Amino acid sequence: MRICIAGGHDQADFLIQNLKKQKHKLVVINEDKHYCERLSSLHKIPVYCGNPSKYYVLDEAGIEGFDVLVALTSSDADNLAICQFAKRCFHVKKVICTVMSPKNVTLFKELGITNVISSTYMVAQHITQATTIANLVNTLSFEDDIIISEVQIENEFKCVNRQLRDLPLPANTIICCIIRKGHDLIIPSGDSTIRGGDRLLVLTNKDSQSAALAAISR
């Protein structure tokens, strides 16, 4: 399939690595010049530097008739614009976007963007409570090989009080959110600290899942 990935950093890296393995034709659009240069050098795929919410940038990237576009920017409004341009102007067959606010899931679907992903929404709709590492639940599959799991952090885990960047996670792994008592949701960065009682949503593939969970629990 021909797939365009618009925006994002860690999420885009994860998708690129997995979609390349499946031999899809990829095009990437991103505003970050240095990130674009790194992607182009590392993956040897077409990378366009620019704001993907702009019509002329999508046009330059040549996405007309693509099978899939994934919008991963940090702005819900930009992701909506990207998906609407892709569908209405460039006839992309399927559009997928992430949203920061779970309230936008229903709104975006009403506006015709039927594939909307929100970490908070997934927690509310799909997560079954897990109390120990043995009770991990796979909750969402993007492809046959990509899964998301919930991990309950026990006080005795060595990852407690450590920053995410210090965890020896496999390459194909992202901790996409931290659910903490007293907080609806924390979107983590590398310097986010894990605390006992946290619940982590871990995005990985089947081959890397065991190593990812071991890195968190050991």
Image (spheres, grey):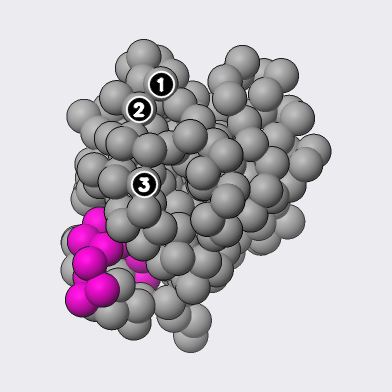
Q: Earlier in the sequence, mark 2 or mark 3?
A: 2
Badge 2 crowding class, 10 Å Cα cut-off, few under 14, some 14 to 19, many 20 or more, is: some
Does 86 sit above or below residue 64?
Answer: below
Label 3 crowd bin: few (<14), some (14–19), many (20+), radius 10 Å: some
- The residue drawn where x is 67% and y is 19% is 42
Q: Are marks 1 and 2 in contact (CB under 8 Å)?
A: yes
Question: Looking at the image, is 73 positioned above or below residue 90?
Answer: below
The extreme bottom residue here reads: 182
Q: Does residue 37 show up?
A: yes
Please name which of the two marks, 2 or 3, marks the residue nearer to the observer. 3
Disc number placed over residue 2 in the picture, else none? 2
Q: Residues within 10 Å of mark 1 (few under 14, many from 20)?
A: some
Between 112 and 99, the residue placed more toward the observer is 112
Q: Amino acid at mark 2?
A: Arg
In front of the other: 186 or 37: 37
Q: Which residue has dot 3 on it?
A: 90
**What SS does tag 2 mark?**
strand
Question: Residue 210, how many percent across, how many down?
Answer: 37, 28
**Amino acid carrying mark 3 in the image:** Phe
Q: Residue at point 41% right, 21% down?
A: 25
Where, by quadrant of the figure, is residue 167 drawn? top right
